Amino acid sequence: MDPAAPPPEPALSTGAVARRLGVSPTTLRSWERRYAIGPARREDGRHRRWTPGDIARLEEMCRLTARGVPPSEAARAALGAAPAARAGSRAAAVTPGGPGALPLGEVRPEARGLARAAVRLDAPVVAELLEAALADCGVVTAWEEVIAPTLHAVGRKWASAGERYVEVEHLLSWQVSAALHRVRPAPERPDTPPVLLACVPGELHSLPIEALAAALAERGVPVRMFGAALPAEALCDAVRRTGPRAVVLWSQSRATADRALVRSVAGIEWGLRGARGHSALLLAGPGWDGRYREPRTERLFGLRPGLALIEALAAGPAAGPEPGARPGTAAGRAAPAACGS
């Protein structure tokens, strides 16, 4: 081997490239067969290995097809750009560009692939990528590092592009919700009161609390999820009927963050006379920002720390902080709290 020769370019498998670009492996093989836009290298056994230059051509192919260019024309354009792609850096080969790209910043490759598939409105691939992320990473990591960054990027793109990209946000949100509902729950812990999760009346944005429900179920914590816009009377009845260890109320906007409802739920007691109990009341979502802290409540910020807090509460009264404890007390320091927006 010539010691002066440059090292070979790192190469990825078809599956890894598909996840990075947000397309299915079948699509990549179809493009190779139909338009000769395939990898420059193959290993023994005809295994495809895609170099950064190969990926750059696929990047261009994805960008053009997402803008409505027919695949045959997109392939010709991408192949014509091959010399420039080969000269580009590896970073350029995996960074989305063009006016239709989402403002993702520094994120995992899975998030970039998910964003590309969402912009193309490729629902089957979006579903496949979400399933893979949840299975490989677990709910918390998949939400924090793949799903939430992509959702936020779609929101920023929507805000900067007027009414464009609304369809991308709707498709991605629907697919995320469906994927979270398919997370396989662990067996519920026996003799453990449930955790009740609900959006406040009038609140229709439920994805973050759906992520919390999936993460708790994944850990075997009993969950009763009531979803969007639960009426106040139904919420209070559910608390009395289930005797939950904790109640999490989600509010996305200040217009739905109702202090009177909080006081009502915080005052509910349940159980037999002489041995009545009450639930920890946890307020989640940006709608509660700047609100006066009501007695016997805690504010929740972030999925991962909130999950730890709720698991501690579910383990028993002695394991969790007393809701409403002031910062600076032992209980207050133990409760930085829960569900991310």
Image: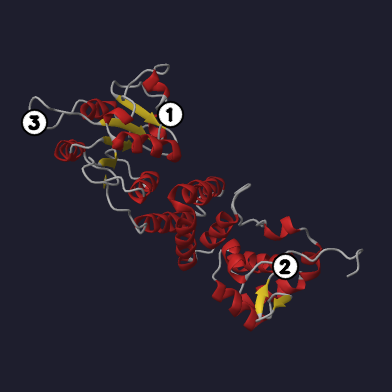
| Amino acid type, mark 3 | Leu
| Amino acid type, mark 2 | Thr
Counting from the top left corner in percent of width and height, residue 91 is at 72, 55
Q: Earlier in the sequence, mark 2 or mark 3?
A: 2
Residue at image coords 35%, 58%: 184
User: Residue 125, labelled with which disc?
Assistant: none
How far is disc 2 from disc 3 in space, using C-alphas? 68 Å
| Residue 275 to residue 157: above or below | above
If the image is split into quadrants, where does the C terminus sit? top left
| Amino acid type, mark 1 | Pro
Q: Mark 2 points at which residue?
A: 51
Q: Is residue 341 visible?
A: no
Residue at image coords 71%, 69%: 54
Crowd rating for badge 2 (residues with CA inside 10 Å; few <14, some 14–19, many 20+): many
Q: What element carries label 2?
A: loop
How far is disc 3 from disc 1 in space, using C-alphas? 32 Å
Counting from the top left corner in percent of width and height, residue 173 is at 42, 54
Residue at image coords 36%, 48%: 219
Name the side, left or right, on which 80 lies relative to 340: right
How far is disc 1 from disc 2 in space, using C-alphas? 45 Å
User: Residue 336, labelled with which disc?
Assistant: 1
Residue at image coords 31%, 34%: 313
Query: Which of these two is toward me, 307 or 211?
Result: 307
User: Residue 272, labelled with which disc?
Assistant: 3
Query: Which of these two is toward me, 128 or 272?
Result: 272
Crowd rating for badge 1 (residues with CA inside 10 Å; few <14, some 14–19, many 20+): some
Q: Can residue 160 be seen in this view?
A: yes
| Residue 268 to residue 217: above or below | above
